[in-house]
Amino acid sequence: MALWRDLLGQWEKSVNTLANQTMGSEEYSRSMNGAMGVTLKMQESMKDVMATYLANMNLPSRVDFTRLDERVQGIEGRLDRIIALLERGALGGPAPATPAAPRPPRTKPSAPGRAQGLT
Amino acid sequence: MNAAPGGAETLTRIQGEVERAIQRSLKGIEYIASPSIAVGPTPKDVLYEQGTLHLYHYHPMSDEIYRIPILIVMATSNRGYILDLARGQSFVEFLLVRGYDVYLIDWSPPSAAEKTLRFEDYTQRFIPECVRRVHEDSGEEDLTIIGYCMGGVLSVMYAALHPEATLTNLVCFTTPIDFSQMELFAKWSDKRYFDVDRLVDATGNVPSELIFQSFDMLRPATRIAGQLQLWDNMWDENFVKSFRAFERWSTDTLPLAGEYFRQTIKELIWENRLFKNEMQVGGRVADLRNITAPIFHAMAEHDHIVPYAAAKPLLENVGSADKEEVVLKGGHVSLVAGANASKRLWPKLDAWLAGRSV
């Protein structure tokens, strides 16, 4: 088993080195990005076809959902800002109902290596 | 007469191998049938959320804590639970036990509407808002920021863009600054062949599969070798547990906001603007010389994602007088979260930070 583990380690190292040499070449970059361009073109064509299809079926498209999502996020953002203002009492609202749990005092002196538990 | 010692030893080894083979088969079945492993066990509260951003505060684990709180900024491409994998294997837990007050910025997949997020949003809106909330929650004006990988880049940009902010200490883990030294990433995104505009315009947010593939392609044999190592160690419960947690995390990559990705490629990788002190963010220049806080930068000897040459210039270029660089054994992830991190990086950081946290 020890020999097998050594061989596995050597195989991993040599394959990674060889692959890195190949993938570091200009040809690789050109062909990889060329392939990605073709995929993107296909995706764009598919997207156009689907958009037309959904419009004809009177169904919302991904773009419509994205717009809705943007609006919901905008509302959430406004709510967050209002809540933050209320929490700070800026709008004359009530103080928070539950006081924060007590925290340990911030008085620990500098002395590394005095921890309990983890090493 | 004594039996030949070599023969007894061989017999014991054969028995051991047979025992392990049986255990491998039994545990292998358990492994396939068992559900996904739980991660992120340290108790925490959500302090603030804004779309892709989540700010957590971890419950203190010490009776007395250091005065200055810590805000960890996680990398935008991965989940923050790598820093809190399991009890006893958690950077966050280590800090809490050592008496630090810990906050963490984590990211979830940006929504389709968040494709417009830019460095401006991360460094001039998200981080400042979290800093403000940490100040408010802790009652302390001083703060230590710890940034991991691209979280480190965002932290460095924040510090460079806000010299007026009360940043007491800056800690970076494997943070790239000279992007021309990110060799494979630079070659794959060669501007002659890589049409980043087309990719972002077509996809909105850059899919997580693409991010995962980019990391995976850096070491294509490692995933296969990892599976074989798993089989070899299937009898070892601790190995399997740790392997599964890492495996879950490494495949759990996040999509990146489209505009943020576009900026990363054009301004960081193509133009190397951060390294040249020419990075314009929201009309301000992120000049590394503006950073004057004490700074600690930890890098890994065998980092295949952020090579030493890409990370090294950080300390050379900042304006801080108090600065320390450490290069430790390990890789990009094992440096901060591996089994040896608790013996190497974490105590080293504690030794550096404790005196600067009072």
Image (tube, coloured by chain):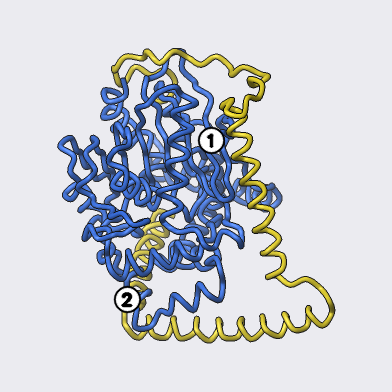
Picture residue at 21% right of the left edge, 52% below the top = B312
Q: Please check whether the numbered discs 2 and 1 fall on a single chain.
A: no
Front residue (pair B289, B281): B281
Amino acid of disc 2: Gly
Q: Chain of mark 1?
A: B
Query: For this view, does B18 lie left or right of residue A61?
Result: left
How many marks do you count on the picture? 2
Q: Which residue is mark 1?
A: B56
Q: Within 10 angstroms of label 2, few (less than 14), some, or many (20 or more) residues? A: some
Chain in blue in the render: B
Q: Residue B31, can we see it?
A: yes
Q: Quadrant of the N terminus of chain B?
A: top left
Along the horizontal axis of the image, is B21 left or right of B104? right
For residue B85, above or below residue A86:
below
Badge 1 crowding class, 10 Å Cα cut-off, few under 14, some 14 to 19, many 20 or more, is: many
- In the image, what residue occupies the spot 67% across and 83% down? A48
Residue A19: give x, y in percent of width and height.
Answer: 37, 74
Q: Position of residue B113 (x, y in %)?
A: 60, 61
Looking at the colours in the rendered structure, which chain would you say is drawn in yellow?
A
Res B330 visible: no
For image coordinates 29% across by 28% down, the residue present is: B353
Residue annotated with mark 2: A24
